Image (cartoon, grey):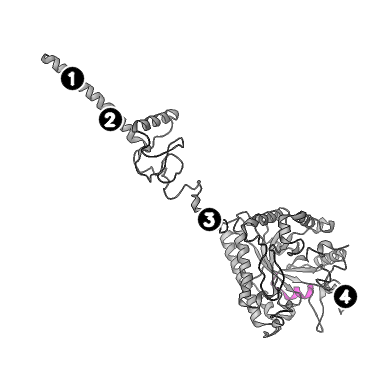
C-alpha cells in the first residue's frame, strides 16, 4: 500500500470515529435531560400526580420502576411523548425545580389530593371540623316573640321510632309541627328533643344510661343527622333535651350532664353541615321532684338563706357553668353558635334567691330560661287568671307571667304550658281538660297583652301520648 493510500485510509477511519462519537454524545445528552431516569428511590415525579415514595410516574400515568426499561427504551418513550405533545415544556435537568413551579414534597401531598389512607381517623373519633358558617337566625329568636316550642320526650313514639320513622312516626310528627290541630298559623318552630332512649326505672336513685344512643353510636348517627336536616328544612330548630332530678345529688351524678354537653358538641363536630347539627342543649333539672329513694327530702336540708340545699345548689351551678364553657369553646372553634337553656319552675324566682341571683345576670350561663308556668287559666284566689297572675301557695299568690317577667329582668323567657292528662299534671295545672281552643286563646292573650323584649314566645309540654297532639277542641 502506498503512503497516499494509507493517509486516505487513516482520514476515513478518523471521520468514522468522529461521526460515531458525535452520535453517542447526542444520545447521552438526551438521556441526561429526561426526568424519568433518576436513581433515587424517594424522588417524586415532577410531571405526574403524587405517588407513594419509590414509585415514579410517567406522563401517561403509567407507573414505572427505576431500572425496568433500558436507556434506549426510555429515550424512545420520551421522544414519542414529545411528538404527541410538542408544546409540553421539557423539565429542567437540574434537581432543583424553578421557584414558580415547586416540586411537591415527598412527605406532604398536594392540597387537592386526598391524604394517605392511613391518615384517615376512625369513624368514631372524627378529626376536628373546620369553621362552619353560622346557621341563619341561630339566636335571632331571642329578641322576638315568635318561638313556638314543643317538648318531645322518649315516650310513645320513642326516640328510635321517630328517628327510624317506624310506622311513619317521623312523618306524623313533622306533619303535626306544620299544622298543629290543622292550624298552620300555629306551626311549631323549635323542638326540645330527647333523642336518646332511656329507661326511667329507679330514676330517683341512679343516673340513667342510654339504651339507644344516636349521639355516640356511629351506626345511628346518620338517622339523627337526617332528622335534624329535615327539621331545619321545615324551619324547625332542634335542641337536644335531657334531664334528671338527681344530677345535683352527688359529684358523681353531676358528671352525667357535663358528659351530655360534651357528647352533643362532639356529635355536632362530626359534620360541617350546619343543617345536620343541634341548635342547642336544653336541660331539665328539677331537684324538688325527688320524692322517693335515698335522696328524698335532701333538697330541703342544709338550706342556703332564701334557698335550698347548699351542696345541691353548688352542683347545679357547676353543671351549667361547665356546659356554658364547653359551648363557648365549640363556638370559638367552629363559628357555629348554639344555645344553652333550662327549665325552671314558675315559683323559683319567689322561693329560690340563690338560683335567681346566679341566673338573672349579664354573662350568666343561660341564653334563655323556660318557665314551667303550669296553670290553666281559671281564676286564682284573687279572681285573676292564674296563667298570668299565678295562684295561691302557702298564703301567697306565686308564679304566673307577670311575676316572672318582673323577677327575671336579665334573661329572655319562654313561657311553657302543660297539656298532659291528670296522670301527668293536675287539672288546675293543665289545659288538657279545657282543650286546645282554651289553650290557644291563652296563647293569643299572652302575646298580645304581655308583650316584652324578654317574652320570646310559648312552649307546649309535651307532644305525646295523650298530651298536646291528642288534645280535643
Foreground label between 2 and 4: 2
Percent x, y of residue 99: 39, 44
Residue in the picture at 73% in, 79% down: 292
Q: Secondary structure at mark 4?
A: loop
User: Which image quarter: residue 468?
Assistant: bottom right
Cα–Cα gap, marks 3 and 1:
74 Å
Of pointers 2 and 1, the one earlier in the residue sequence: 1
Query: What residue did someone put label 4 on?
Result: 379
- Contact between labelled residues 3 and 2, with CB atoms less than 8 Å apart: no
* Image-based side of 458 in relation to 385, left or right: left
Query: What residue did someone put label 1 on?
Result: 11
Magenta segment includes 409: yes
Q: Quadrant of the C terminus?
A: bottom right
- Contact between labelled residues 4 and 2, with CB atoms less than 8 Å apart: no
* Image-based side of 49 in relation to 92, left or right: right
The magenta-colored residue range is 399-411
Residue 89, above or below 209 = above
Foreground label between 1 and 4: 1
- Contact between labelled residues 4 and 1, with CB atoms less than 8 Å apart: no
User: Looking at the image, which is closer to me, 449 or 42?
Assistant: 42
Query: What residue did someone put label 3 on?
Result: 121
Q: Secondary structure at mark 1?
A: helix
Amino acid at each position: 500500500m502506498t503512503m497516499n493510500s494509507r493517509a486516505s485510509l487513516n482520514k476515513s477511519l478518523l471521520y468514522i470515529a468522529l461521526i460515531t462519537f458525535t452520535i453517542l454524545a447526542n444520545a447521552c445528552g438526551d438521556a441526561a435531560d429526561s426526568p424519568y431516569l433518576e436513581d433515587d428511590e424517594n424522588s417524586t415525579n415532577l410531571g405526574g400526580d403524587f405517588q407513594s415514595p419509590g414509585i415514579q410516574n410517567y406522563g401517561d400515568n403509567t407507573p414505572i420502576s427505576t431500572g425496568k426499561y433500558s436507556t434506549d427504551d426510555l429515550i424512545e418513550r420520551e421522544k414519542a411523548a414529545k411528538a404527541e405533545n410538542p408544546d409540553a415544556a421539557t423539565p429542567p435537568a437540574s434537581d432543583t425545580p424553578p421557584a414558580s413551579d415547586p416540586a411537591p414534597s415527598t412527605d406532604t401531598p398536594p392540597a387537592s389530593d386526598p391524604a394517605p389512607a392511613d391518615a384517615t381517623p376512625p369513624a368514631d373519633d372524627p378529626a376536628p371540623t373546620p369553621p362552619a358558617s353560622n346557621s341563619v337566625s341561630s339566636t335571632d329568636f331571642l329578641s322576638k316573640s315568635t318561638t313556638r316550642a314543643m317538648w318531645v320526650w322518649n315516650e310513645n313514639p320513642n326516640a328510635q321510632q321517630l328517628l327510624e320513622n317506624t310506622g311513619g312516626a317521623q312523618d306524623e310528627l313533622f306533619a303535626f309541627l306544620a299544622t298543629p290541630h290543622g292550624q298552620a298559623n300555629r306551626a311549631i318552630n323549635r323542638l326540645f328533643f330527647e333523642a336518646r332512649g332511656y329507661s326511667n326505672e329507679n330514676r330517683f336513685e341512679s343516673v340513667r344510661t342510654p339504651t339507644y344512643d344516636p349521639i355516640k353510636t356511629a351506626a345511628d348517627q346518620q338517622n339523627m343527622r337526617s332528622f335534624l336536616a329535615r327539621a331545619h328544612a321545615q324551619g324547625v330548630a332542634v335542641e337536644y333535651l335531657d334531664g334528671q332530678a338527681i344530677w345535683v345529688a352527688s359529684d358523681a351524678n353531676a358528671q352525667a350532664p357535663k358528659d351530655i354537653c360534651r357528647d352533643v358538641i362532639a356529635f355536632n363536630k362530626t359534620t360541617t353541615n350546619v343543617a345536620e347539627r343541634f341548635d342547642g342543649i336544653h336541660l331539665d333539672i328539677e331537684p324538688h321532684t325527688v320524692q322517693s329513694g335515698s335522696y328524698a327530702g335532701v333538697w330541703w336540708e342544709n338550706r342556703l338563706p332564701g334557698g335550698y340545699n347548699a351542696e345541691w345548689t353548688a352542683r347545679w351551678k357547676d353543671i351549667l357553668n361547665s356546659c356554658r364553657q364547653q359551648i363557648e369553646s365549640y363556638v370559638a372553634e367552629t363559628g357555629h353558635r348554639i344555645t344553652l337553656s333550662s327549665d325552671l319552675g314558675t315559683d323559683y324566682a319567689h322561693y329560690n334567691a340563690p338560683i335567681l341571683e346566679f341566673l338573672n345576670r349579664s354573662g350568666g350561663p343561660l341564653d334563655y330560661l323556660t318557665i314551667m308556668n303550669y296553670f290553666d287559666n281559671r281564676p286564682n284566689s284573687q279572681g285573676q287568671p292564674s296563667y298570668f297572675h299565678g295562684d295561691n301557695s302557702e298564703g301567697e299568690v306565686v308564679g304566673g307571667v307577670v311575676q316572672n317577667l318582673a323577677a327575671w329582668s336579665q334573661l329572655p323567657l319562654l313561657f311553657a304550658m302543660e297539656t298532659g292528662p291528670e296522670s301527668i299534671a293536675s287539672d288546675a295545672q293543665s289545659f288538657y281538660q279545657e282543650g286546645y281552643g282554651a289553650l290557644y286563646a291563652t296563647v293569643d292573650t299572652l302575646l298580645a297583652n304581655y308583650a316584652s323584649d324578654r317574652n320570646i314566645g310559648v312552649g307546649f309540654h309535651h307532644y305525646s301520648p295523650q298530651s298536646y297532639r291528642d288534645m280535643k277542641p
